[in-house]
Image (tube, helix red, strand yellow):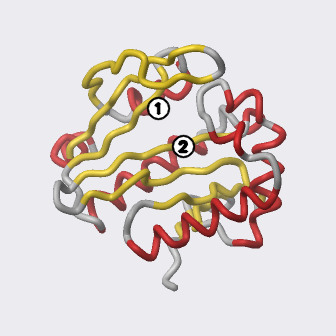
Amino acid sequence: MDMFKFNIDESTSLSLLDMKDAEKLFELIDRNREYIGQWLQFPSITTHVDDSKAFIERTRKRYVEGDGYWLGIWSRNELVGSIGYLYIDLENRKTEIGYWLGQEYEGHGYMTKAIKVLINHAFEELEMNKIEIGAASDNAKSRAIPEKLGFICEGTIRDYEYLNGRFLNRVIYGLKVDEWQEAT
């Protein structure tokens, strides 16, 4: 299987998650369960390392099928978060990027650098026309990244998701290939 791996800089890289990463993935989620769980559902259903193994198996299958996949974000051989394409729509030439980071790793630029890699890969290698990013409207840290990278706010979906006893609105950002080329 041809694996996606990209060295961002001398100490940071992205790579397709492997079964040997299941324990590290579970431990990172477990340490950040409450923090990540404010905005995303998966921590509440990731209760054992076997859940991480099943997730890795699904994402590797989706990678082979060209249907979106998740990558580990690594810094000095330590898993700090994950990023991926939620789907890859070849017919309409668009995708959506999702991401999360352990709280202890915020503020080092890992996510911004990782998203730039996926933007370039989507536009240059996958020949996408558009990339979307969705984030809970109250999640200022998550929203700051697409805003910093030149994504356009395309609107808010009200009561998009019911999580932890409350409805979350979702802000949708979009970036087209010509907008990215103009900005870079």
Q: Nearer the viewer, residue 119 or 51?
A: 51
- Does the CB distance between marks 2 and 1 fall below 8 Å? yes
Question: Which residue type carries mark 1?
Answer: Ile
Question: Which residue type carries mark 2?
Answer: Tyr
Location of residue 163 in the rendering, given as x and y in whole percent from the top left corner = 59, 24
Residue placed under numbered mark 2 in the picture: 99
- Circle number at residue 145: 1
Q: Nearer the viewer, residue 179 or 131?
A: 131
Q: Using residue 89 as the reference point, say whether residue 97 is left or right of it.
A: right
Location of residue 112 in the rendering, given as x and y in whole percent from the top left corner = 51, 41
Q: Compared with residue 39, is residue 49 higher up or lower down, i.e. above or below?
A: below
The residue sitting at the bottom extreme is 1
Mark 2 vs mark 1: in front: 2
The residue at 67%/63% (across/down) is 54
Q: Using residue 134 as the reference point, say whether residue 167 is left or right of it.
A: right
The residue at 37%/15% (across/down) is 158
Q: Residues within 10 Å of mark 1 (few under 14, many from 20)?
A: some
Q: Compared with residue 20, is residue 162 higher up or lower down, i.e. above or below?
A: above
Q: Using residue 22 as the reference point, say whether residue 157 is left or right of it.
A: left
Q: Nearer the viewer, residue 67 or 175?
A: 67
Q: Compared with residue 135, is residue 69 higher up or lower down, i.e. above or below?
A: below
